[in-house]
Image: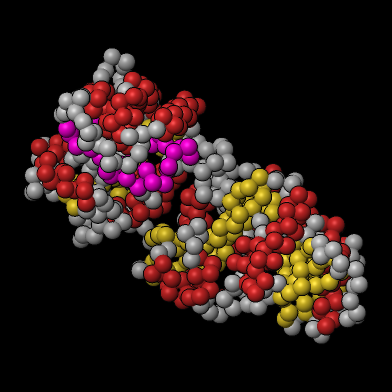
Amino acid sequence: ITISLPIMTKTVNHNLAQSTRHYRQTGRVALSATASPSPFKDLTFPFNVYAHALLLQEGKATYPHYGLFPNNQVSLQTAQQFSTDLLMARLPPPPCRILEVGVGLGTTLSLLNQRGYDVHGIIPDAQQIAYIQKDLGSGASVSCHSLQDFKVQPESFDVVLLQESAQYIEPLVIFNKALDLLPLSGDLVIIDEFALKYDEAEIEGLHLLDDMAALAERFGFELVERMDLSTLAAPTLDYLLHITATHRQRLIKDLTLTDEQLTRLDESNRSYHKKYASGHYGYALLHFRKKTVPKWRLQILAKNQAPEMFGLFKKTFHHDMTPAMWQWKYGSNSAREIGIWRDNQLIAHYGGVSRKILFFGQPQTAVQIGDVMVDTRERGTLTRKGPFFLMAATFLERYIGYGKPYLIGFGFPNERAMKVAERLGLYAEVGHMTEFSWNTRTRFPLWGTRLNLIDREQADFAATAADQCWQHMAADLQTAIIGVRDWQYLLNRYLDHPNQQYQIMLVRNRFSKYARGILVLRYDPEGCEIVDLIAPLAEIPLLITHARRLAGIHGARRVFCRITANFAGYFSVAGGTQQTVNIHIPANAWSNGPSPEILKDHWWLMSGDKDFR
């Protein structure tokens, strides 16, 4: 018996385990409980713990999935077989062609073959493939592929089956591949763990059940059946806690573990058990049927598809997105892009760039939405069936809110896009920008302070000063939402910009060298813009005075800056003129996260947060 490892939390090495916990299973072994060394010793922690504990408890290993317990008298093996039988009851009668995604130990694949199905299994682990072929024979129809990389002729299967493997695969990949692999009326059957709700600002690992159902519909799949099996599956967690406690000392000895490792694992499992009990996590069977082929196809934009994005960008904004600019914005693994294709041509794009923030004083991660584009020939459909809604709703569901990679999102849509998104229920306005403008000043210095140009040549000195200024600013904004403005941000955002040149100035006391603040300036035909500043709020008038003086030295006709209107008071004390700017700040109103009411009029945003020129 083996169990997939959904009970991992942040207290365990989650990233390492996720890549192997489903795909590197133990075999259907029957060994002496005193056998040494453990056949599972080299497996990834904590999977080796579960596998060896089950061997010690049961004397053999067979299935790699949870059991479903109709009552407390049923054994785990019987409960696991009950789960597999429930799944098989949803299959069409043989002969039909089945793709099993994530074959585990090969047990289900073997049963399907015995019942007359034409079945092929895939798993992205060569070691596991070798085991299955040794166990079932070299003729076993299995191959070493992930679902995303598996390539066959379209409509090659009648059923795509995922038994506790869906949680490890991006849902957009699941439905895109199923759409290609299945004919009309083909079946997609999933039995797995899901998140039933998220209401805390923590990054979780399970797909939301409701979001899976909504995404399936966007891909032309009909929901045939949805079974909540949470109550039946939950006793498996009790069993895991029981066997790791029962065999604790043998596990430590046979697997060369520390007591602390098992303690942390038990704490993780108890936390997961609580999420089942509270209704946050659960277990379900989903049966979908392919009913239509959608006009538009949602996909995550791969890096090799960037040239298609460049073409759409040029068509939409009438200037070029260079490869260097794309790399600067989207090159990191924390960025996200969703595209929509029609007839193999990219017709829409929705991008998101990760941003570290302080959320009312607490570190969090936000995403800045940008490069939202829809081909002019496709823009007429501004309903919940159109391309903008499909990609925006999917992006919000996949990435923003409680339990998602980004707690909140923000952006700077034009008025038309904002109104469309509000009407569709995607966004809600939580602020707007205002602009201040000042005349330039004389070139005479301010004797109490001095300026230092910040560039890469003074990296050590600049890093210390920038981080000090940021810490003072952050202390003043404990009741606000603000993007982190430390040295690393200055470096990546401004000094590493592939196209634009910025002037970054440190203002400090002339004699004590105490850092008063940092100015980020950009000069263009409109004048000198204060793109960003990093300082305690009381220092803003001083920084504006220095900006006006620098603008006079450079011959600029004026100084201006844009700031969210809720912080306008800190700039108005420096005089000048103020005018409203038609730039609105949206918030996610679609997926479950902090409500727009909580966010309203709390963002600190300037042109540097908006501008990517």
Q: Residue 14's x, y, as percent?
A: 42, 43
Of all residues, the one furthest to the top in this rendering is 73
Q: Is residue 11 left or right of residue 40?
A: right
Q: Position of residue 406 (x, y in %)?
A: 55, 50
- Count up the numbered dots: 0
- Location of residue 71 with respect to 490 vertically, above or below: above
Residue 588 is one of the magenta-drawn residues: no
- Residue 294, quarter of the rendered image: bottom left
Which residue is located at x 28 percent, y 14 percent?
Answer: 73
Residue shown at the point (75%, 59%) measured from the top left: 469
Kindly identify the residue that appears in the image at 67 percent across and 71 percent down.
Answer: 458
Colour option used: secondary structure
Please give left or right for residue 510 compared with residue 218 in the image.
Answer: right
Residue 415, given in percent of the width and then of the height, sits at 66, 64
Depth check: 289 or 209 in front? 209
Q: Is residue 246 above or below residue 504?
A: above
Q: Which residues are magenta?
A: 1-29
Q: Main secondary structure of the magenta part?
A: loop
